[in-house]
Amino acid sequence: METLSVALLPISGSRAYPIHIGTGILDAAELYRPYLAGGAAAIVTNSVVAPLYLQRIRTALKGARVAEVVIPDGEQAKSWQGVEQVVDALLAARLGRDGLVVALGGGVVGDLAGFAAAIYQRGVAFVQVPTTLLAQVDSAVGGKTAINHPRGKNMIGAFHQPCAVVSDVATLDTLPDRELRAGLAEVIKHGFALDAAFVAWLEANVEKILAREREALAHAIRRSCELKARIVAEDERESGSRALLNFGHTFGHAIEAGAGYGTWLHGEAVAAGMVMAAELSLLMGQLKKNEVSRVRALLKRAGLPVAGPALAPQQLIDLMAFDKKAAKGSARFVLLEGIGRAALRADVDPAAVREAIVAAAR
Amino acid sequence: METLSVALLPISGSRAYPIHIGTGILDAAELYRPYLAGGAAAIVTNSVVAPLYLQRIRTALKGARVAEVVIPDGEQAKSWQGVEQVVDALLAARLGRDGLVVALGGGVVGDLAGFAAAIYQRGVAFVQVPTTLLAQVDSAVGGKTAINHPRGKNMIGAFHQPCAVVSDVATLDTLPDRELRAGLAEVIKHGFALDAAFVAWLEANVEKILAREREALAHAIRRSCELKARIVAEDERESGSRALLNFGHTFGHAIEAGAGYGTWLHGEAVAAGMVMAAELSLLMGQLKKNEVSRVRALLKRAGLPVAGPALAPQQLIDLMAFDKKAAKGSARFVLLEGIGRAALRADVDPAAVREAIVAAAR
């Protein structure tokens, strides 16, 4: 067992938490023990992950009273109904305020279980055990939890930091190819938005990641977590620099909504969204043509879409208008000023947005 | 217009907020203006308060786009359904992350609207405009928000501090007598738990408060807020001293649950609970008989119950077992070590608890 610990900078005073990254660490009891002082825990997972890993987590929590909550697989679980199911189960298990919630699964499980932990008795501790690449590099880190609303994704939620993240690279062995690639989109995003050297490393190693070479995966996860952690520590509540992590997301969310949630995976939508954002950066005169080509080329090699769905550009633009990052009704865009250098722009010409969507489709 | 501002000590770094207490200040536009930079607000109120004060708040928010959410009157609104209603309305009004939620009403409205504000887009600003004595002296101050669950009160919630509290003493003119007295129970609680001089003042002025003399009311509210604010600033998340504010509440919650929610008002249950806690303090040898008599006498003069409902003591004890302040399954009690000096005790003999319940009923 190999454990890399990434200590976050302190957030809101005293809160910092370890991110353990390694192979076969899922059931390392010592990673959970510090949070079991209350003697009770609840594992929240879904029907796909439960048969694979639930028993191993149970074993790791030995000594504590452990409840299990198995939610249906899929994004639809991120609903009022889903959070009610989890909260009902926590109450039925008489989990106290000193209990622990363990979120075992991908982004949906982490977002839902994390939100339930945030509002259960005004907040209980939780550990993220992400089992998808997307969750390991993105959703499990940073403390954002949420459920969806028919009017928009992640419209209801809370900032609630986990007390630890346990990322076992071996769990990616069971991940479908399409989901691996979708997770890789966020890894690539971290590179283009924040770290040119990481982009160069990805350009040299993308095939190794797709082949699931564990060392390459562990490095990609670790570097993504480091980059994200740095930003989150600066701006936990997304009032400033945290928005840079949304590179590709303003377009991406519109693509997801426009195609119908679940049609495109989040990472796929973000991939096409990054190309649109790169094209927009080019149109705004702040990115070079060959840099846009690098964005496109790396995403293509990762097997990700570089053009949006068959929708009129205006349809995407309409869907962007109520992105929740919008300040005072006008959409802000995260654009690139170079490889690894994202920056916020509020003064974007709507005509340029349309042109960028068209350019990405070419 | 007279405005007393009580500045809280900073909470979690930079957050401190003013509590404005005065007569006729409900529609003072300058109290809301600092939080309207986003240009949009939603007033959440109930069907009883709306006809009385909604229009005046609307006027005070002039210049902003204002939505209204009117929930049913009563504790039942503090439910999943209630929070869904509020969140749906905020989304329908396209309130952004820079929008403001104004909670206009008593504790139910404040708890529900505050919780909705806490989870809407992971948290938006809100102003409390409490219109009951209970809310002005207790629930609107301190950042606790919550809804109920069939398995227990306030089981789902968040810590979310308001950006300001606007307590207009004139709104108490329309408050039913029974509710005024129930609010007074929490005022009296602040005295017995934290401030002997305030107890003496209450013993001299309780009739003036019941007669709704505005100066007496304003002083009672102000002192309650000061006492509560001091504790909350020390311990926002209730890991230590904040528990002292729960004097009378372990018994009180059990009384509310045992009698059936809504039968006893919260303040009434807390009043009887304080007598039980005082009797228990006497039995534990840390309070004098004449001090217990002072607790009982002041509550009686305030027209509050000093004995619990017609329930077997064991029934109340069973209901206490899952109070959410319980650590590791064993109930802790807030007892008095003297007038104005509450302290936590974890080593309470169950037989003494039963005896205290019996003693309170005598």
Image (tube, coloured by chain):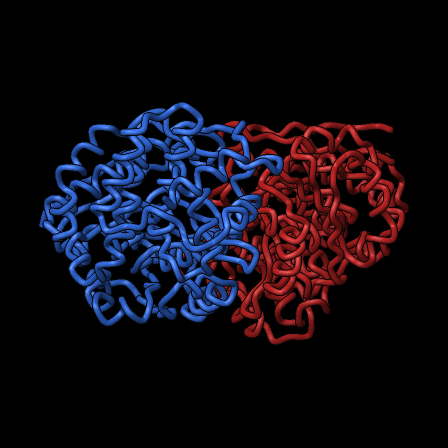
Chain colours: A red, B blue
Residue lying at the far front in this picture: please name it.
B362
User: Which residue corresponds to the image point at 71% horizontal and 67% vertical from the top-left?
Assistant: A262
Q: Nearer the viewer, residue B94 or B110?
A: B110
Q: x%, y% of residue B251?
A: 44, 44
Provide residue A130's location: percent of width, then percent of height. Answer: 75, 45
Q: Is residue A23 above or below residue B132?
A: above
Q: Is residue B93 visible?
A: yes
State the image coordinates of residue B162 (x, y, percent, origin top left): 35, 47
Is residue A293 something one can see in this rendering?
Answer: no
Q: At which x and y percent is residue B355?
A: 47, 37
| Residue B284 or residue A122, whichever sits in front | B284
Instruction: Classify residue B25 as left or right of residue A158.
Output: left
Instruction: Report the residue at 51% width, 38% height from top.
Output: A235
Check the image and report above or below for B355 versus A246.
Answer: above
Q: Identify which residue is drawn at 45% across, 29% down.
A: B344
Q: Is residue B141 left or right of residue A106?
A: left
Q: Between residues B187 and B66, which one lies in front from this camera angle? A: B187
Write down the quadrant of residue A99 in the picture.
top right
Instruction: Report the side of B180 relative to B139 (left or right).
Output: left
